[in-house]
Amino acid sequence: MVAGVSSLQAATVESMRLWAAPDHARLVFDLTAAANANVFSLENPSRLVIDLDESYLDTDVSTLPLDGSAIDEVRTGVRDGGGLRVVLELNREISPRHFALPPNDQYGHRLVVDLEYPGESAVENPIDPIEAMIRDQEILAQRANAQARAQGQSQGQSQGQVVAEEVVSPAVEPTTTAVQPAQPHPQRDIIIAVDAGHGGEDPGAIGPSGTREKDVVLEIARRLAAEVNGTRGFKAVLIRDGDYYLGLRQRTQLARDQKADFFVSIHADAFTSPRPQGSSVYALSQRGATSETAQWLADSENRSDLIGGVDGNLSLRDKDQVLRGVLLDLTMTATLNDSLSIGGQVLDQLGRINRLHKSRVEQAGFMVLKSPDIPSLLIEVGFISNPDEERRLRDPVHQRGLSTAIFNGLRDHFERNPPPASLLAWQRDNQRRPSGNEYRIQSGDTLSAIAVRHGVPVNQLKQANDINGDVIRVGQVLRIPRS
């Protein structure tokens, strides 16, 4: 039963809405007043019963789109002793949860019932994390063996040690360096997680003509995913591929489960005035927003997570306490630097086909970007609150232009900085051997040691390679400036 909710008057169910996702279904009751609810399961056959105290039905449940959900049929009736009973006939195992939502600018009182499917993933053909871990260990072992042969290192020497916290090793190398036959290069795809913002119960911003942000960004996300999948060496994972809701933290977790190399969240901007227009690119800020607009936008986007009803607790303050409990380590620094670098290239590409609202990458505390191990960007493709831009955001040609610009920026970065074991890294190794003025970073390298080896000052080496801190990566190619 929903705690702390008492009905002072009879409630009417004015409508019922259903969204089907790959890993759950969400049923929303629109009520004229708050109502106590009791939700429980029955077996043989499998059913979910929803009892609403002192409530009446004033909608046709036969119009609910049940396809793709765990619900075969919806039956309603008057419960013994008064009130409304809704029975869901189920076709699969579910784990139910429910919570109430108070009125907002769009809806009145609501009861939300989630039917979660145990063991299912929100993305198609999910990557098994255990298999991915084994794959990565095999890649590391192959690299360690090849390095041992090339450098003649003695058995027992560590191949992946972090020196003075200047080089970030992806994982601890195997304890043995016994030489084994060379294995084929993995030539793996670079995985891009494409996240369409909002969805389902959360429509996002709504334009003057009624265009919903959740619809526009899903179309752009699908076009972006198609471009990624159409390019050799890349693979897209659509975090949301339908009209359903996903929590902000769930989105980044799905990207992590998919072993994504990059996470991009697509949104359409909105403001209280219809005048602002143009595209913006945001990366995470650990110290606050870089502008008042960025802070306002981050607050409005993060507020959408209230719709998720996490643990039935709708207090944003409580969620901030959870977020404050997340410790971001040195990896976050490297991830943020990558995000800013990629963001600059994406912004440059967007500026070629659309007006820019901001000429640099903004930083704000977006919850959806708070992943310590995956470089991430949030892209506001335009202001849906601007009538002219709203019209363009609905145009398939403009949507395609936006998706192409975003991918061009991502591709430019990864062609210059391909992840180890990727196809792009293999192509670079075979087609672009380091010349005398280039050096490929090996396990155990530090910036200071590389600078001494090539006789150049560390600061000059950093400047030539646009390195702000001391973090370098195995496989990265450095330009060696002339001393």
Image (spheres, grey):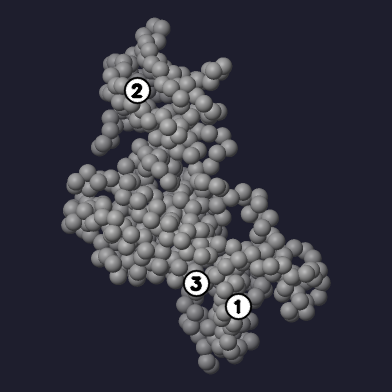
Mark 1 neighbour density, 10 Å: few (under 14) some (14–19) many (20 or more): few
Mark 3 neighbour density, 10 Å: few (under 14) some (14–19) many (20 or more): few
- Is disc 2 placed on a helix, strand or loop? helix
Residue 154, above or below 358: below
Residue beneath label 2, please?
Answer: 61
**The quadrant where residue 166 appears:** bottom right
Label 2–label 1 contact, CB within 8 A: no
- Is disc 3 placed on a helix, strand or loop? helix
Residue 32, above or below 172: above
Residue at mark 3 to residue at mark 1: CA–CA distance: 14 Å
Q: Earlier in the sequence, mark 3 or mark 1?
A: 3
Question: For the residue marked with disc 1, what is the amino acid?
Answer: Asn
- Is disc 1 placed on a helix, strand or loop? helix
Q: Quadrant of the N terminus?
A: top left
Q: Residue at x 35, y 54 (%)?
A: 220
Residue beneath label 3, please?
Answer: 415
Residue 79, above or below 447: above
In the rendered image, the residue lying farthest to the bottom is 483
Q: Position of residue 18 (x, y in %)?
A: 38, 31
Q: Position of residue 53 (x, y in %)?
A: 37, 15
Residue 153, above or below 123: below
Rendered image: mark on residue 430: 1
Q: Residue at x 57, y 79 (%)?
A: 431
Q: Earlier in the sequence, mark 2 or mark 1?
A: 2
Q: Earlier in the sequence, mark 2 or mark 3?
A: 2
**Residue 240 in sight here:** yes
**Residue 25 in sight here:** no
Question: For the residue marked with disc 2, what is the amino acid?
Answer: Val
Q: Is residue 417 left or right of residue 208?
A: right
